[in-house]
Structures are given as C-alpha cells and as structure tokens.
Image: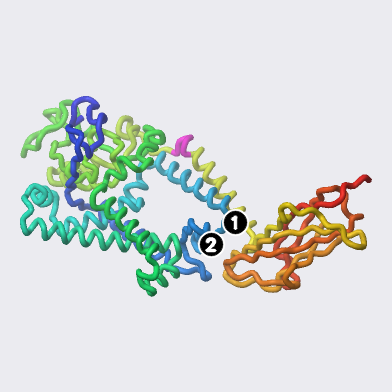
Amino acid sequence: MSQDGENFRDSIGTINDEGKRAWVFPKKPSGNFYQYRKYVSYFLLAILFASPFIKINGNQFLMFNVLERRFNIFGFPFWPQDFHLVVVSMIIGVIFIALFTVAWGRIFCGWMCPQTIFMEMVFRRIEYWIDGDRGAQMKLDRQPWNAEKIRKRVTKWIIFFLISFLIANVFLAYLIGSDRLLAYIADGPLVHVSTMVSLLIFTAVFYFVFAWFREQVCIIACPYGRMQGVLLDDKSVVVAYDHKRGEAENGRKKFRKNEDRDALGFGDCIDCFQCVNVCPTGIDIRNGTQLECVNCTACIDECDTIMEKIDKPKGLIRYASEANIEKKEKFKFTPRLKGYTAVLTVLVGILVGMLFLRNDVEANILRLPGQLYEHKEGNIISNVYTYKLVNKTVEDVDNVSFKLLSHKGTVKLVSGDSFVVPAQDLAEGTLFIEINQAAIKSDKEKIKVGVYSGGELIETTKTAFLGPRSYN
C-alpha cells in the first residue's frame, strides 16, 4: 500500500487533510486504451447529438417529453398509457448495468457514462489545449493573475460556456422535441422568454458541473459508486493493480539501471507515481478498488508505458479480478451472473411480448361521473359516457365509430356518426350506449365496445353499464 494502513479510505481523493477541495490536475492520458475510449466516446457523442434530429416514420428517434408525458424510444412513440412499458424498460436498464458491474466493475462509468465522456473527451482536452499538460496547469494555477493567466482563463471559460450552451440546447431537444426547438430558435429568444430562461439554467448547471464540480459528480453525487460496493465481489473484473507482482517480497523500489530487482526481492512497481498523476479522480490505484475509481484505464496505459521503458512485461495494472491476481483464476460465469442474466432475459422477453401486444390505437370509455341511467321508450336503458382515443401512429385514423359487442344495443355519438383521430394525437367526446332492459342481468353490467375504422375492428375496450336492479 502507498499509504499507511487503510487511512486513505477515511476521506475521498478530492479532499485534502484540511477538509478543503484538492483540485485534481491529471496528466494527459495516452495509449491503446485511451485511443479505444476516444473512438467509443466520439461515436456515443455523435449518437447523443444526432438522436433528437433523426426521424423514423415521422417520430423523433429519442424524446423524453416529461411535461406532456410523451416519449419516443428508438422511433417508437410511448404515451402515458404505455407507462408500464417505460417502467419495464428502466428496470431492464438497471439490471443490465448491475450485470455488467458484477462482471466488469464500473466499465459503464469509464467508457459510456455521459459525465465521463464530456469531462475527459471534451472539456479536459480543451483544457490541455489551452492550459497545457499537468505541470503547466499546476504552474498556471500558482502564478498571479497576469495577462497570460487572464487570457487563458477567459478563453477557456468562454469555450466551456459555449459548449455548455450547446449541450443545453440538445438536452432541450430531448425534452420538448427538435422540431419545436428549431421553431423556437427561428422565432428568436424574445418570443419564448421562459424557454430561454430554462435554457440558460441548463447551461449554468452544465457549466458548473464541467468547469468546477467535475470528478466530484462521480464521487459525491452519483449513487452508482456506492452501489458498486454492494455488487462487486472477488470475481469481478476491474481495473486492478497486481500487488503480487508489483510488491514481491520486499515491496517497491525506485528504478536503477542494471539492477537485478528479482534477485533483491523487489517488485516490478518502481514507485514512479505516474498512475496517480494520470488519474482523473486523483487516487492511487495501488491501494486497491476504491469508491473514486471509474475504471477509465488511464493508469493502465501509463503503467504499460513505464513497463516498456524499464523492459518489464506490461499488465502490472490491468483488467483483472481479485481472484485472478491472488489465485490466477480465469473469468467464470458465476451463479450471480447466471441469476442476473436469467432475470434480464425474462424481463426482455416480457418487454418484447408487451411491445407486440401494444395497440396502435388505445381507447378508454368511462361513464360520465354523477350521471344515472335514463329509462327511454321501448324499455330502453341509456347511459352517457366520455371517450378518449389515443392514436400512436404517424397517420390519421379515419371514419372511427363504435359498436356494442357484448350486448344487443346501439352506440350513438353526440357529434355525428364517425370522427377522425389525428396522427400522434387524441380524440375526445361524448356518446350514449342504449341497451334493452331485457338484456341486462344486473344493476352494474360489464359491456364490451368495439372501435372500428372504416368497418375494420382496431381496438376493444370494456366499461360498466348501469341499469335497474334485476329481480330474476
């Protein structure tokens, strides 16, 4: 261990001994894993920025309109009536992340989390471009506010603000829809002042997160770091330091040329601290699995570079489980992984089944509250209802009418014989259902109503029908 005992666990890596913020100045990473992460990050960034503006069958590829309770997921529209599908999808997402955490630790954090991607692949890269690498940044931080520091700080802050503003616009496109956002932009900010204020609030939040709060989002705010402590076990593959090889019998030792470290009983770790300097959360990976570690692999690349220079095998820091380091065990599909996989498979099957059973048009017919039945001529009992039809498709549903399926009777619309349900919209109205009293068996009859479009049955729904108490 690089620190005495377990004292490093008494505080997080970004807090110093005085309890103040310890600003992290990570060295600019490089290496194979970093290159792979860049490819993955830019691909995911492209998806993030493009998704609100991609249309499939007229539907936005991804939209989460919480205010109007309308969601588009991969081009499929979801309405409040489909909320159960959204819930199942969210549960699947949680189980999926849990499965990957049990197997490969916080691989999601290091490779796919938007916070990590924006912080490490956008904002920090701009910072390296303007302020320089670790040494230059630390020197700039210490120097007085001269012309150079003011110029660099103001340039960086302006660029950070502009990027935050761009992210806020994309975020808003997910919430209200890209078409509405583009229309608001064309109208100008003065026409939609409330939207502009919301946009500036989002911008301020993103700027605060990426310009100041930074890695503390992962350490303090994100609950996933705490959750990993429950999910990980000695079989989980994480970014780990091979202490068996690094410490050997007599621990670490600074590198000396032409020295036989093996004969002296020293490990391969030369205590260069490059793995610490490159860490974006400021931890020492040699202390073992820690809350702050997001599995970004920067320490793997840096350690591999050092091992090459001193002619030692790579992999002193690598993706490995505790069981692999201690007992040389290979990765196994453990009972826990099998359990998570089984649950995930069942939930995905349920979701797929629900999607296939999901109707394009959903109908709800409810008795008008506070209204009793009406007794008409010819022994006819009449009830008044309100109906709501939701059209989830991108085309209008024409010539919509209702027919009684469970009983002999009639359905009369208040406004005409038929109507149109607009695409991705709803239609509401009032109707009367009339049934002969002889066909009514109880004072609260269950009836089935069919919804037709041009004579074709497109949906069925059930409702209650009130009538005189039967004495049969």
Is any atom of residue 367 visible in this view? Answer: yes
Which residue is at 9% across, 56% downward?
Answer: 149
- Helix, strand or loop at label 2? It is strand
Looking at the magenta stretch, what is its main secondary structure?
helix
**241 left or right of 73 in image:** left
Bounds of the magenta segment: 333-337
Q: Residues within 10 Å of mark 2 (few under 14, many from 20)?
A: some
Q: Position of residue 93 (x, y in %)?
A: 47, 48
Q: Quadrant of the C terminus?
A: top right
Q: Which mark is residue 355?
A: 1
**Residue toward you, 190 or 241:** 190
Q: Amino acid at mark 1?
A: Leu
Q: Amino acid at mark 2?
A: Phe
Q: Which mark is residue 424?
A: none
Task: Assess whether mark 1 and mark 2 are in contact (beta carbons under 8 angstroms).
Answer: yes
Which residue is at 83% across, 57% downward?
Answer: 374
Relative to 408, residue 139 above or below: above
For marks 2 and 1, the one nearer the N-term is: 2
Q: Residues within 10 Å of mark 1 (few under 14, many from 20)?
A: few
Q: Which mark is residue 76?
A: 2
Relative to 211, residue 281 above or below: above
> Magenta stretch: residue 253 in it?
no
Q: Position of residue 244 (x, y in %)?
A: 24, 31
Q: Position of residue 125 (x, y in %)?
A: 21, 57
Is any atom of residue 40 visible in this view? Answer: no
**Residue toward you, 30 or 146:** 146
